[in-house]
Amino acid sequence: MELKTNTNFAGIAATLRGAQRIALVSHVRPDGDAVGSLLGLALSLRQMGKTVYPLLEDGVPENLMFLPETGLVMKPGSDPLMDLDVAIALDTATHERIGEGCMFVLSGAAKLVNIDHHGSNPGYGDLFLIDSREPATGQIIYKLLRETGMPIDDAVRQHLFAAISTDTGSFQFSCTTADSHRIAAEMMEAGLDIATLCRALYHTYPKRRLELQKALLNEMQFCAGDRIVSWILTKELMDSVAMLPGDTEGLIDTLRAVDSVVSAVIFEEVAGGKIRVSARSKDTRLNVANVCAQFGGGGHAMAAGARIKGTAAEVSEKFLAALEAEVAKLG
């Protein structure tokens, strides 16, 4: 874990203060950290009088629409955004992960700022700050705002709490830092209603999510002496429950919770004849990012992914063989 940067908080803040038209973007299939860091920063900048354009290739998933001002988020249009002073990529390990549409509409920005916590981020952009010691990009954004005097109100806190909480597994994952708890305490002292937020984040589900969970429990497969568990999420099942983006959020944690398991994997059929692989580890000796890298993917040591060409049967067989080889090294 390390800090990789060619700037600092003061440099980023000076760039943002000197800009007027600012676009913000995060990765495709956005999660809580993507949406929370995007809108947390966007709402702060708007209070500074900036013209902001929050963009997401796939929009805000339904499970996060309860957060403030999600209606501000735009999907990319057919024309580039003109006269942009700055574009900011958040929580996006590679530039391409913002999506083809967002790459096109932001192509005319005068400057690109890259803020992230993925260690695999190569440091694209004119200014970049990648801190893999932080569990969430939202935690970086909170520190940026606090340490440079940028506005933080209740709506900003809601977004940044959602970012930090979801990427730390509600402060349960090993990536959680003492600062994560200190920031949550600061937010509570400022009046943030964490109980209501957590109820919306973790205890409010549509029926279709429970249908997915039922299938997961019926169809999960164990291997490597029950140390690896996996599930194939088929297009047929997605269609039958009318699945929406965000419905699978956290399902992999059900698999990972099995006492004998050191790694959980979900294989999801996606467009283009590819399989989306989501892998998790709960043993710090097992780096699933290294396994995903064998297939052109990446991520964090304990949470990583890849997109692999082939059928679910083909991809799962190849990926699980590579994962089993790593698990065997644990003894």
Image (cartoon, rainbow, N blue to C red):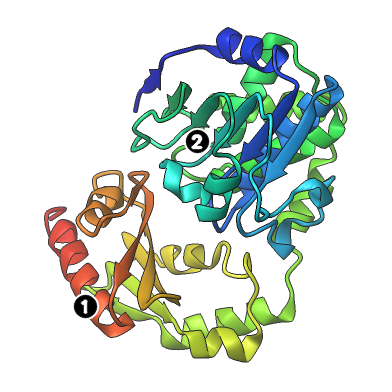
Residue 43: % across, % down: 79, 32
Residue 120: % across, % down: 33, 38
- Residue at horizontal 50 percent and vertical 29 percent from the top: 114
Viewer-proximal residue among 155 and 188 = 155
Residue 293: % across, % down: 24, 52
Between tags 1 and 2, which lies in front?
A: 1
Specify whether 308 is left or right of 116: left
Mark 2 burial class by Cα count in 10 Å: few <14, some 14-19, many 20+ = many
Label 2: element kind: loop
Viewer-proximal residue among 186 and 266 = 266
Viewer-proximal residue among 174 and 98 = 98
Residue identifier under label 2: 135
Specify whether 190 is left or right of 25: right
| Residue type beneath disc 1 | Glu
Residue identifier under label 1: 317
Which of the 4 image quarters holds residue 255? Answer: bottom left
